[in-house]
Image (cartoon, rainbow, N blue to C red):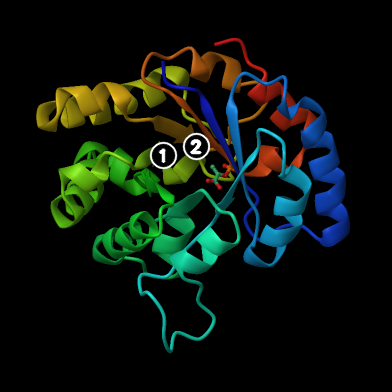
């Protein structure tokens, strides 16, 4: 059976002191949680987080990776560098990267290739805006985001990707998708993958993200096609992330 995956996206938050308090709290429950917990801190704190989590069940991830291997890309970080810093996962195509940094589906596919070539598990973030949902375009937007990557990297490589469905209107807004709304999209994604590869559709992890917290997570995780969460704001609160990681599945 797939293990429930909880990914903590700290975004551009934290400090050495704040991180150490948060990590001390997380280490207290991590070995008793029945989920795989991954922390994605900002780049400068990768080493600090690694030092805390070594020997625990917690895994390390990054929030972004460059689509090139090395070279003159000032300010960027390569997949091999992340691997050297003990990252196992990397978020790719988060909606904030798509909208604030103009990341296209093509660039996202290149990032996924870089991540996989370095031995990292890419977490492909997809999701529609409120305007797209209201126009009835949610499904086509999501399938376009998925198919662009699959066509580019090939189905064989796609087998190692984790998908995170994150409706943009739910990210950081406190307005989460209802369990029914989320399940409907997750089911649609799984059915699409079933059409390409029935076995993959069972094995692939499809996470939900968008204002997940210690209150709404319990109902969301009961949905058949939700395999875990990508958590932003609530991952900065030790009590909230503890409750989410200890959910009865
Ligand atoms: C995210 O950063 O991917 C996210 C889902 O944030 P939040 O949980 O704060 O909505």
Q: Secondary structure at mark 2?
A: strand
Mark 1 residue's CB less than 8 Å from ligand 1: yes
Left or right: residue 60 versus residue 54 is left
- Residue 166 in view of the camera: yes
Q: Position of residue 202 (x, y in %)?
A: 28, 21
Which residue is denoted by mark 2 in the rendering? 209
Q: Secondary structure at mark 1?
A: strand
Q: Position of residue 81 (x, y in %)?
A: 52, 68
Left or right: residue 80 versus residue 232 is left
**Residue shown at 59%/15% (left/top)?**
218
Crowding near pointer 2: few (<14 within 10 Å), some, many (20+)? many
- Closest to the camera, between mark 1 and mark 2, is 1
**Residue shown at 66%/61% (left/top)?**
12
Left or right: residue 140 versus residue 6 is left
**Residue shown at 87%/45% (left/top)?**
21
- Residue 141 in view of the camera: no
Q: Quadrant of residue 195 in the image?
A: top left
Mark 2 residue's CB less than 8 Å from ligand 1: yes
Which residue is denoted by mark 1 in the rendering? 164
* Circles 1, 2 touching at the beta carbon (< 8 Å): yes
Q: Which mark is residue 53?
A: none
Q: Is 50 above or below relative to 36?
A: below
């Amino acid at each position: 059976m797939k293990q429930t995956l909880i990914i903590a996206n700290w975004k551009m938050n934290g400090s050495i002191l704040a991180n150490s308090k948060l990590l001390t709290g997380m280490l207290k429950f991590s070995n008793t949680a029945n989920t795989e917990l991954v922390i994605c801190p900002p780049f400068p704190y990768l080493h600090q987080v690694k030092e805390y989590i070594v020997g625990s069940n917690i895994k390390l991830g990054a929030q972004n990776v460059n689509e090139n291997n090395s070279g003159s890309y000032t300010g960027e970080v390569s997949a091999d560098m992340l691997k050297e810093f003990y990252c196992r996962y990397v978020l790719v195509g988060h909606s904030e990267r798509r909208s604030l940094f103009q990341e296209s589906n093509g660039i996202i596919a290149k990032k996924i290739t870089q991540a996989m070539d370095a031995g990292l598990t890419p977490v492909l973030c997809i999701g529609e805006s409120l305007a797209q949902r209201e126009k009835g375009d949610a499904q086509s937007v999501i399938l376009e985001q998925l198919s662009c990557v699959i066509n580019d990297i090939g189905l064989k490589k796609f087998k190692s990707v984790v998908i995170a469905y994150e409706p943009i209107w739910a990210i950081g807004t406190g307005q989460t998708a209802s369990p029914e709304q989320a399940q409907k999209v997750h089911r649609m994604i799984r059915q699409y993958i079933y059409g390409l590869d029935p076995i993959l559709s069972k094995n692939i992890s499809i996470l939900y993200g968008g204002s997940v917290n210690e209150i709404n997570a319990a109902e969301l995780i009961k949905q058949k096609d939700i395999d875990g969460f990508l958590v932003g704001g609530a991952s900065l609160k030790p009590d909230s992330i503890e409750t989410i990681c200890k959910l009865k599945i």
